[in-house]
Amino acid sequence: MAAETPVVELKQITKRFPGIVANDSISIKLHKGEIHALLGENGAGKSTLMNILFGLYQPDEGHIEINGAPVAIDSPNKANELGIGMVHQHFKLVQPFTVTENIILGMEPSKAGGQIDYKTASEKVKKLSDQYGFHINPNARIEDISVGMQQRVEILKTLYRGANILIFDEPTAVLTPQEILELIEIMRRLVAEGKSIILITHKLKEIMSVSDTVTIIRRGKVIDTVKTAETSPFELAEKMVGRNVSFKVDKKPAAPGEKVVEISGVTVKNKDGIAMLDGMTFDVRRGEIVGVAGVDGNGQTELIEALSGLRKIDSGSIKLGGREIGGQTPRKIFEAGVGHIPEDRHKHGLVLDFSVSENMVLESYYKEPYTKRGFLNFRAINELASRLVSSFDVRTPSIQTKARSLSGGNQQKAIIAREINKNPDFLIAAQPTRGLDVGAIEFVQSQLIQQRDQGKAVLLVSFELDEILNVSDRIVVVYEGKVIGEVRPEETNDQELGLMMAGSKQGGHMHESSK
Amino acid sequence: MNQANKILKWFVSDSFIVSLAAIVLGLLLGAVVMLVGGYNPIEAYAALVTRVFGSAYGIGEMLRETAPLLLTGLAVAFAFRAGMFNIGAEGQVLMGMTGASIIAITLPGIPTGLHMILAVIFGALFGGVWAGIAGFLKAKRGVNEVITTIMLNWIALFLSNYIVRTFLLLKGDQRSENIPASASASIDWLSSAMNNARVHWGIPVAFLAAVFFYYFLWKTKQGFELRAVGSNADAAHYAGINVGRNIVKAMFISGVFAGLAGAFEVLGVFHYQAIYSASPGYGFNGIAVALLGMNHPFGVMAGAALFGTLSYGSGGMSFEAGVPPEIIQIVIGSIIFFIAAQGIVRFVIKPFYGKRKKEKVL
Amino acid sequence: MKKAVKLSLFMLLAFSLVLAACGNKNSAGGVKVGMVTDTGGVNDKSFNQTSWEALEALKKDGKVGDIKYLQSKSNADYEPNLNEFIKGGYDLTWGIGFALAEAVQKVAGQNPDAKLAIIDGAVDAPNVESVLFAENEGAFLVGVVAGLTTKTNKIGFVGGMEVPTIQKFEVGFKAGIEAVNPDAKFTPIYASGFDKPDEGKAAAATLYDSGADIVFQAAGGTGTGVFNEALDRFKTGKKVWVIGVDKDQSLEFGNDVTLTSMIKRVDVAIKTVSEQVVDGTFKGGQTTTLSLKDDGVGIADTSKANVPQDVLDKVEDYKAKIVSGEIKVPTVE
């Protein structure tokens, strides 16, 4: 093994940006037929490293060897020539084009007379697809196929260009659990055919199931490189975060009090008149976390929007502490005592071009002491921001830093700080840990539980079954805009939940919705 | 102390240096064009500077040229800060002119000064309401403001002409009657001290408007809302800010700036309102000025002063150096081009600039 | 950045060295005459251009020294442009066009020692000489030509803008037609400005389509569109006529479509008043209207190319009657 030349070797790569060292003398060897995982928190330097390998950045020190020969990769085109392909987290596909058109984009095979030879191209795509078990229709339009399929198109694109070394950047972030299993299958087939893979991720579960070797990066440095078979998730997490991480969420049994939120018969229709929420009914009590489980698209988004006032409800009622809040404006609902950690933190949670400090008062800027006689009181605003930043451990160079330049985890912490600081009776947390690393997930979840323990009502909407099972005190399962069942986490497991989410009404006690 | 530091910082900031480099590159390209055309660029640029800064008259007229540019530039920049592209400053200027003319001409006998202030306020309101229409249509119906403001420009042109022709016309001429002295915004004592340069109250008002812009947008509650809506309307909506109302408000204020420009052109410069066969172009220049100033009020100030200097000084280029107006337009155009095409400027100055930056880091 | 500035300065320096020898200042001495155009600019193929050509002719003949023009980008430029000449010590400053009347009035008042003159506008100031033209009389003559030449008995008119100066053309033209051909149908169309060739073309198309075979244009740059429409039709084999304005437009648009032109001797006015300054006979404070009698307006000498002699004779008859005062040409309807 030691005698074999690695297909890619990164030697002492150092990359500095103004004020920080993104990569500090990083060395990694990728062998043929290997899946090599790069594990690290957000902002640890994984993406910088891969951008260097893919020719988007130049290292300040160190060099890259491909099959033992030193190379200078000065552009993505050069990387392509060297057989390096990258599957980006955010797909770079032309939506109205077909699969084949997207794959050949930029290197269209032509017939005599300059016409594009679609026939040959789509045959070649078909052949590749069959070889690796992609099951892709080369003539389907991108906008018509699922996210998982789109990702396969990205993979095919690199294979079509003759890539032997594939870089996967957080490939599972956008996939459903089923799609993740299929992706893992595809990755296994790729290495079986002699390709080599670098997998960038911060999800331990995936690493354990698919990788051969793991390199852990923390703050720009390699902490360790280990064989996956010889390690455990606990060890990896500890190395990644630099301290002990508990996977089991510590919490006392819930002590639910009176009903804070009563949602009864809420119906919301979309533009086409289809009921996205169809008489949804459930309640949340003081001192409990209610988890909403369901496959994406079964009314979760509409439920959150209705609860936070972003969407009018067509019928039914939402009561907070006995007062109707359905159909009120977002501000009225906030003022009534609702906090909301939104699903999409870039779209709804933050104004990215505002400073951390400005974002902290995004909902309360108009109140005393933040505004006095129409003028913003920056002293009060900055005081608040400094206090929240330090008590919620938001890592930012300064409170005047733009929210855009914070890492995902710190952005989320900032939002949570803002929402919890309002001291709401009812806290809605929509996908609060999406895209976060282990350390941040632990922080967010413990905050939710702390709120519960302080007697708040918490609603947790999540597509991560583990999170629902670990954090909730009670689980309502939604299907096609209705509550289809209600279970206690200690009385169920992910198989049963999975079945219920797929629409079969078994387990738990039935919850009859009105109408 | 902190403030001084901030200003210092701004001077070495990227945007400032890039703007400066863009101006230099624009002047160089202009020089090349003049050389090719057989004119002496040194002589021409010297003539430009002399015409503007060589006499009190020149400075006064440059300020007169700058004031409407500054106000329309602020109008465009203000709307932009709230996430909208106000192409309609042109029409709002015309409506500002019309509003001011109506008050000035049809209501004689109001005491001097008060009459002028009333006319200015009406002009500003006319401009504000005109822009507010586009804001309202966007807020209520989601109609793209670019389209509505362009359409409103035409309506403003013909509506203004109709009003002047029907109610305010000077018999046998293509313009309104003269406004009475009580409504004049000219600063007569200063004007005679500057060899009859047409200085008027709109000049200080324009600079105050820039200061107002800054304080309103960055220091007040309402400005916070406007910026939030402009940067991320979804997040603003989610945070409980009434997005629609802010869109209308932003467009109204934007229109007020443009309306002021129009009002002062009538009350301070011409003392009558002409019937225009085509849009006079104030608002379109305002877009260029906002672009030059990167939509920051103080940047717009600098941009308007530059544009005003070039525009007024260009007469000197043709008078002293015989450069034809077409080539002068190319020079002005190339400066704007380089500022708009920042990528090119950054590329050109990179060898010098990049090195400096690196040294700083290490 | 410092280097960038240095580099630019160096380049500028290099340019200046190359050019050091090229400086050619001509201060010929003699009377200095300046002119300020309206927003139409000096190449408007109309009165601005005619005025400038007249000044150039004067300079060529050695009658005046320096001549110079300044173009106005907007009507805010009129005042500073006039002032530029006055401060530059020019002996006479022309304002070309009625749009400059207000500015000339103001600047004249502020500079009582300066001499100014204006074309097409009446300014009441002791140091301004105003020159107007009896366009209605000239238009009457081309109206006679049109009335006698039309085969379809339909005649059109395209005006640049519905303003009194242009309406004078329409009224005179109409009177001329009615004098010789009372049955002819007359249709006027006005554009929205003097710089809209597209509107001029569209207006001409409308008139020709409705059966007119002659169109008189008094529309500055907009009139170019009228000629272009006629030329387009001529190329497809349809014969239509345009009557030009201000100067002999057959020289520019050719005899295929130019029936005749109504001449406005702006050049005579420029020459006369400028020479008064040279001679020291400039009085100022007068408004002169140049009419048929003064040969200030008339029809182009080249008209015989397309107009038969008997028609031209008729024109001469009417001219004599107008000059003698037997016929009074109206100015307003």
Image: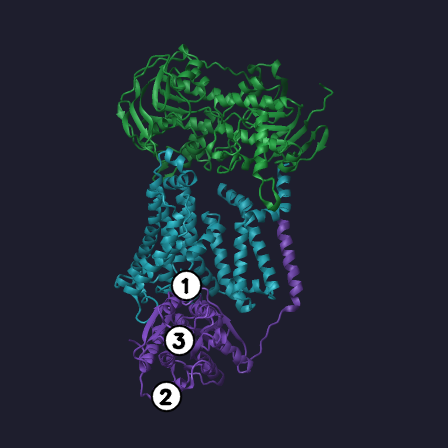
Chain colours: A green, B cyan, C purple
- What residue is disc 3 on? C120
Residue C14 in the image, given as x and y percentages of width and height:
66, 60
Residue A60 in the image: above or below residue A503:
below
Q: Secondary structure at mark 2?
A: helix
Callout 1, which amino acid? Answer: Leu
Q: CA distance from mark 2 to mark 1?
A: 60 Å
Q: Which chain's residue wears label 3?
A: C
Crowding near pointer 2: few (<14 within 10 Å), some, many (20+)? few
Q: CA distance from mark 3 to mark 1?
A: 33 Å
| Marks 2 and 3 belong to one chain | yes
Answer whether residue A265 is visible to the viewer in this image: yes
B347 and C137: which is toward the camera: C137
Identify the disc placed on residue C317.
2
Residue under disc 3 on the same chain as residue under disc 1: no
Q: Amino acid at mark 3?
A: Asp
2 vs 3, front mark: 2
Residues at marks 2 and 3, CA–CA distance in whole angstroms: 28 Å
Q: Tag 1, which chain?
A: B
| Label 3 crowd bin: few (<14), some (14–19), many (20+), radius 10 Å | many
Which residue bears the numbered disc 1? B190
